[in-house]
Amino acid sequence: MALHAHDEVVLLLGAPGAGKGTQARVLAGLLGIPHVASGDLLREHRQRGSDLGRAAQVIMDRGDLVPDDLVVEMILERLSRPDAERGALLDGFPRTLAQAEALDSRLAERGGRVRAAVYVDVPTDVLIERLAGRWMCRSCQASFHQRFNPPARARVCDGCGGELYQRPDDRPEVVANRVNVYLRDTLPLVERYQSRGILRRVDGNRPIETVRTSLREALGLTEVAGMPA
Ligand code: AMP
């Protein structure tokens, strides 16, 4: 899928545990734009101990949403960096109507727009099982699953050799809240992009490679030499 204008953005929508992050890394490479994940950026702020990181900490550990104004400012700052000039693949943002509106107006100011929104659809019971078995890399944020996508060596990232850990918000009691927050605040966005005619749905309840192929088809991406299929 060729991006034509300045600031064309592709959204990956889906519940926590739908597999957005896993797929986004490869898709962003194919699209030639940066992968911008709001959750990863917030976790980086936490690690750095910034004001935003400290403000977000308790909210994230409960599985609630960080206030719109803070997240919007963080994302707009990220989108203003030179590597995002042609656009970005957004993962985990927008998560509310207010965030979607803020994104639209920022893009419109610069002659850009949301080019496509891909919805990775996974049933709720599967999400909970996936999140509970998830291991994340502390260094590169890649994610693994103890059953569905295990690392070659226990607790070591296949990609960068970093240490794998379980996110505090992947605890079962927090996972249930995250999924409920998603259904209440974020799922309505699917309708927003559907009514604009830019939504593509992909069944995310299939093996990683199969979902990846469907996502590539949904975005009109053909294989690029040297890139993983
Ligand atoms: P994620 O890694 O996308 O599952 O995000 C982890 C947590 O970061 C979420 O449960 C929220 O607390 C927070 N977060 C990430 N993205 C957003 C967003 N767009 N709006 C509000 N909170 C967010």
Image (cartoon, helix red, strand yellow):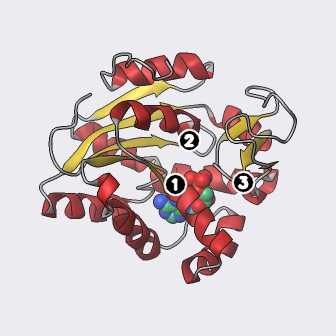
Q: Which residue corresponds to mark 2?
A: 21
Depicted 118 relative to depicted 184: above or below? above
Element under label 3? Answer: loop
Rendering coords of residue 164 (x, y %): 79, 47
The answer to whether the beta carbon of the residue marked 1 is less than 8 Å from any atom of ligand 1 is no
Mark 2–mark 3 CB contact (< 8 Å): no
Q: Is residue 27 left or right of residue 4?
A: right
Tally of marks: 3
- Residue type at the position of mark 2: Gly
Rendering coords of residue 169 (x, y %): 73, 57
Circle 2 Cα neighbour tier, 10 Å, few/some/many (<14 / 14–19 / ≥20): many
Among the two numbered marks 2 and 3 on one chain, the one whose residue lies closer to the N terminus: 2
- Residue type at the position of mark 1: Arg
Circle 3 Cα neighbour tier, 10 Å, few/some/many (<14 / 14–19 / ≥20): many
* The one of 216 and 226 positioned closer to us in this rendering: 226
Rendering quadrant holding ligand 1: bottom right
Mark 1–mark 2 CB contact (< 8 Å): no
Q: Nearer the viewer, mark 3 or mark 1?
A: 3
Among the two numbered marks 1 and 2 on one chain, the one whose residue lies closer to the N terminus: 2
Question: Which residue is painted at 56% across and 57% down in the image?
Answer: 39
Depicted 157 relative to depicted 113: above or below? above
- Residue type at the position of mark 3: Arg
The answer to whether the beta carbon of the residue marked 2 is less than 8 Å from any atom of ligand 1 is yes
Q: CA distance from mark 2 to mark 3?
A: 14 Å
Q: Which residue corresponds to mark 3?
A: 138
Q: Residue furthest bottom?
A: 51
- Dividing the picture into quadrants, the one containing residue 27 is top left
* The one of 88 and 56 positioned closer to us in this rendering: 88
Q: CA distance from mark 3 to mark 1?
A: 30 Å
Q: Which mark is residue 155?
A: none
Q: Which residue corresponds to mark 1?
A: 184
Among the two numbered marks 3 and 1 on one chain, the one whose residue lies closer to the N terminus: 3
